[in-house]
Image (tube, rainbow, N blue to C red):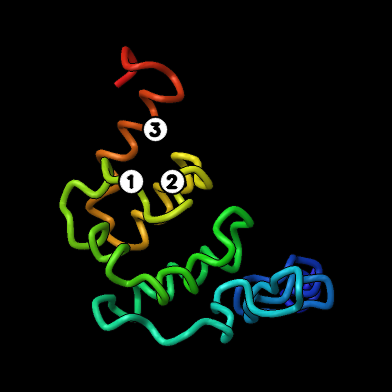
Amino acid sequence: SSPKEIASQSPPGPHMSSPTSPKPFTTKPKAADGGSAHAPSTRHTTAPKALSSYQWQQLCLLDDSVPALRGLCDHIARNVQSWAQIWRNSSAHSLELPASWTARCTLFCRMLIAKALSPALISPMAKAFVADSLGSACV
C-alpha cells in the first residue's frame, strides 16, 4: 500500500474534515421559544442602580427560564428598597424574600436568586438546603 492509499483509508484527524465528521459547535443553543438560551429577554426594565449589570442579567435569566420565578425582575424593579435588604445583607440567606416571594419560592429557587445577587451566599444556603432536604445530620 502506498502512503497515499493509507492516508485515504485512515480516519480524518482533527485538522482534516470529512462528510461524516461532526461540525464544530459554533452557534448558541436555542431556547424553546426560538431565542438564545443564554441571553435574557429584552422585556425587562433597566437594572436598578444598586445592582451590577451582571447581577441583573443573572436575575433576568432566572426570570425567563424558571417558571416559579416569572415576574421576578419586574417585581425587583418596582420594589427596589425591599429587595435591597437582600443584596446588601451578608446574612441574606436567612432573610425573608419580599412580598409573596418567600411563599412562592422553594429553598432551591431562593438559592438561585442568592447566587445571582451574591455568590458568597451560596455556601450558607447550600448548607440550609442540605439540612432541609436530608436532615441536619448530613451537614
Please indicate whether residue 92 sits to the left or right of residue 31 in the image. left
Counting residues from the start of the chain, the first of labels 1 and 3 encountered is: 1
The residue sitting at 46% across, 42% down in the picture is: 108
Q: Secondary structure at mark 1?
A: loop
The residue sitting at 26% across, 57% down in the picture is: 86
Please indicate whether residue 135 sits to the left or right of residue 12 in the image. left
**Residue 49: assigned label:** none
Q: Secondary structure at mark 2?
A: helix
Please indicate whether residue 9 sits to the left or right of residue 64 in the image. right
**Residue 102: assigned label:** 2
Residue positioned most to the front: 99
Q: Residue 131, percent across and down?
A: 36, 23
Q: What residue did someone put label 3 on?
A: 129
In the rendered structure, are the residues bearing label 1 and label 3 in contact, judged by CB atoms less than 8 Å apart? no
- Quadrant containing the C terminus is top left
Label 3 crowd bin: few (<14), some (14–19), many (20+), radius 10 Å: many
**Could you tell me how far apart the alpha carbons at marks 1 and 2 are, in whole angstroms?**
6 Å
Q: Residue 31, percent across and down?
A: 70, 71
Q: Residue 57, percent across and down?
A: 43, 75
The residue sitting at 65% across, 81% down in the picture is: 27
Q: Can you say whether 111 is above or below 127 in the image?
A: below
Counting residues from the start of the chain, the first of labels 1 and 2 encountered is: 1
**Residue 96: assigned label:** 1
In the rendered structure, are the residues bearing label 1 and label 2 in contact, judged by CB atoms less than 8 Å apart? yes
Residue nearer the viewer, 28 or 14: 28
- Quadrant containing the N terminus is bottom right
Say which amino acid is labelled 1.
Glu
Q: Secondary structure at mark 3?
A: helix
The quadrant where residue 126 appears: top left
The residue sitting at 37% across, 55% down in the picture is: 98
Residue nearer the viewer, 24 or 122: 122
Q: Can you say whether 30 is above or below 95 in the image?
A: below
